[in-house]
Image (cartoon, rainbow, N blue to C red):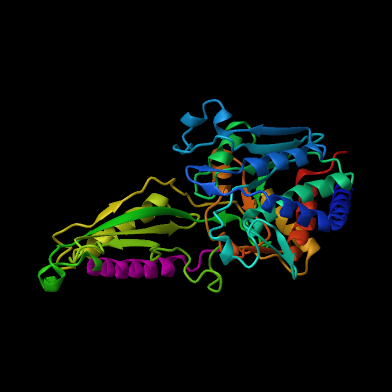
Amino acid sequence: MAVEHERKAALAAAQAAEALSDEVVELAVELIRRPSEIRPPSGNEGEAQRFLAGRLGELGYDKVDVFLPTDVPGIEQHPGWWPGQDFTGRPNVVAVRKGRGGGRSLILNGHMDVVPAGKPERWTYPPFEGVVKEGRLYGRGACDMKGGLAMAVMAAEAVRRAGVQLAGDLILESVVSEETGVYDGTLACCARGYRADGAVVVEPTQLEICPGLKGNHVYRMVVPGKATHNCLWWAGASAFDHAIYLKEGLRRFQEVRTEETRSHPLYADPRRFAVPALVDDIWSIQAGDPNFFAVPDEAVMYFMVEMLPGESREGVMRRFEEFVAEWASRHPFLKDHPVRLESPPLRPIFPVAVEESDPVFTVLRDTLADLRPGQPPVRGFESACDAMTLMLWGDTPSLIYGPGNLANAHEIDEFVSLDELRQGVRELAAFIVRFCGVAE
């Protein structure tokens, strides 16, 4: 009887979500219209966070906690804290709805910060107007991840409007400082005591279940050369040419990694993951000076080496560094002039995954299977996110599930599908009930 009662309550919450189909869009629009761009080491999330805190205060939560990450006692001594950020005027917002007891607790986590919009004239619609057009909501953060935050808020509201009394606590977190990989916002929530039996991070996954995410290490590779006048280039040794040789090495190591990770259960689909674990992904290279006619005597490249859940981060790094040393030893110049592999001051990202037997995974999978035809897709997340923080520092098994396509995040004309927003509210509302349980 208890299982049937819970199933009926979940269905009631999903039905209540239908009446919120306009409200979820309206909330997402309101969030987009409050710019919250991150500009390291600071950001301007404050106005949007205060607006959300006010809205949550109207929705019957037992507590709405608004606090700066640096307000948490001892946070800057926490082993997971990343220094150098300015959190002035950038609060986290956490809303708590207490359960009646005897159920599982759940965190819904999302970040309010967005990447800069860039030049507004490049957008088809102004980036901070929240334009609805032909089944899409356009604007900076629509996909990553104000749409997801609106979905989480309205899913919790659907449960309340359905009159369902949860057995376990429901915690909704809107955090700052995620987009640069700092993750201090969610870390501060963990250190303030917000932990649970499970969490859903509402990053864009096209409403597919992602129980794991990649780790990575960013490298700064300094490549030596020998300068000479460019009219006598053959008398020098171009660091740019050497960088090209080393880029070929990255490609070769990536081929090795692709072969050994191709069957990973979360990253095996070649249509989505042509390369399961990236290596040859250089995003910056500098060589020479345009003001001097000289062969470059140094080149600097930035790239990252990825590792998948179940792999040792340090082990993959060690193998890569040994490969680079061996690859350089075959080169006539580099064998006598060592390449330097440096680590920029960026937070280390660790690969993590939820066990298949964990209730946060099994309940979400079963809930979605009941609400949509066929089995819901399960895969790894393409990038890093706060699920890592929740699992490492909050002892909270965490899934990633939300509306939008990550390939559309951060780009000009960012958007989220209205159908996905509304479907996500229905599915997440039903999941909340089934995971937290219904009070007797």
- Nearest the viewer among 186 and 293 is 293
383 relative position to 426: left or right: left
28 relative position to 411: left or right: right
Q: Position of residue 149 (x, y in %)?
A: 69, 50
- Magenta residues span 241-265
Residue 84 in sight here: yes
- Nearest the viewer among 120 and 143 is 120
Q: Residue at x 57, y 35 (%)?
A: 188
- Nearest the viewer among 402 and 226 is 226
- Nearest the viewer among 244 and 316 is 244
Q: Position of residue 276 (x, y in %)?
A: 48, 66
228 relative position to 54: left or right: left
Q: Position of residue 190 (x, y in %)?
A: 59, 36
Q: Position of residue 157 (x, y in %)?
A: 81, 46
Q: Residue at x 50, y 44 (%)?
A: 182
Provide the major secondary structure of the magenta segment. helix
Instruction: Name the image quarter holding the C terminus.
Output: top right
**On screen, 391 above or below 241?**
above
Residue 259 belongs to the span the image colors magenta:
yes
Residue 105 in sight here: no
Q: Residue at x 63, y 49 (%)?
A: 35
